[in-house]
Image (cartoon, helix red, strand yellow):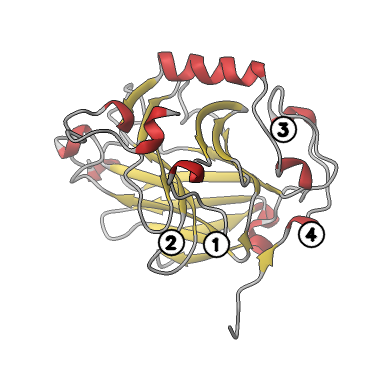
Amino acid sequence: MTNRPSVKCLKEFDAGLSPRDHGGGIGRSKTAVSAGNFNEEFDITWGDGRGKIFNNGQLLTLTLDRYSGSGFQSKKQYLFGKIDMQLKLVPRNSAGTVTAYYLRSQGPTWDEIDFEFLGNLSGLPYTVHTNVYSQGKGDREQQFHLWFDPTVNFHTYSVLWNPQRIVFSVDGIPIREFKNLEAIGVPFPKNQPMRIYSSLWNADDWATRGGLIKTDWSQAPFTASYRNFKADGSRSWLLQQMDSTNQRRLYWVQKNHMIYNYCTDTKRFPQGFPKECAVH
């Protein structure tokens, strides 16, 4: 194929991350990419000036008003590794807004790993919406309420992706694990490199209480902020598993902060749950 986009291969990552960056129990990497410069790593792709980069490439903001949202994407593609991004979400009354942060490949049978942050009325919790697509099929939603206010300070949202599993984490605490279950016929993203995307947009037809609460445009413009992007593709992540500490953390989050799990939605799957639900 001509003009193939550049793929960030595992051997090309070459700067170390500290144990704190990895989260407890995940282990230190010897080779990785250092914190990325937004000017060098990303393109603002839409929004007519509503996406901006500041501080010599160290800070990026996306803005939404009644006329348009905005978004950016990575210049490179990634096949496996650990992606970290620090976000500070839209403050105050963010109902109706969605801040999406995800990896996605191209084509009709795309793969995708999603974080979406669904806004809410002032004082009510954001909903963290996660999903995994493989070969163009998703419908694997899990949703969570965070245990902190994500609009006051920056927090780190991470995706660990290797051939065995996908782990979503917040500040180093795993909130979801999606395992490779190809052995029982469940497709798993492992062959298609993905770009990183993020966008801030109006979704008041569904985002907050199923669309009952609309965006209050008197609060606009709405702004989400990004910093400290890191992409770690060192080989240590290829075989990474969750240790007992992180297994306990995952259980705590899913017990206390999960608000929706497709694997327990009997109305949605009256003929039986997807195959992976018997294992996850």
For mark 4, what is the residue? 12
Residue 21: mark in rendering: 3
Q: Earlier in the sequence, mark 2 or mark 1?
A: 2
Numbered marks: total: 4
Asked if residue 180 is positioned above or below residue 189 in the image, the reply reads: above
In the image, residue 208 lies at what x, y percent? 24, 35
The kind of residue tagged 3 is Asp
Q: Earlier in the sequence, mark 1 or mark 3?
A: 3
Residue 110: mark in rendering: 2
Label 3 or label 4, whichever lies nearer to me, is 4
Label 1 or label 4, whichever lies nearer to me, is 1
Give the Cα distance between marks 2 and 3.
Answer: 30 Å
Quarter of the image for residue 9 reads bottom right
For mark 1, what is the residue? 192
Label 2 or label 3, whichever lies nearer to me, is 2
Give the Cα distance between marks 1 and 4.
Answer: 18 Å
In the image, residue 174 lies at what x, y percent? 56, 27
The kind of residue tagged 1 is Gln
In the image, residue 274 lies at what x, y percent? 32, 38
Secondary structure under badge 3?
helix
Asked if labels 1 and 2 touch by Cβ distance under 8 angstroms, the answer is yes
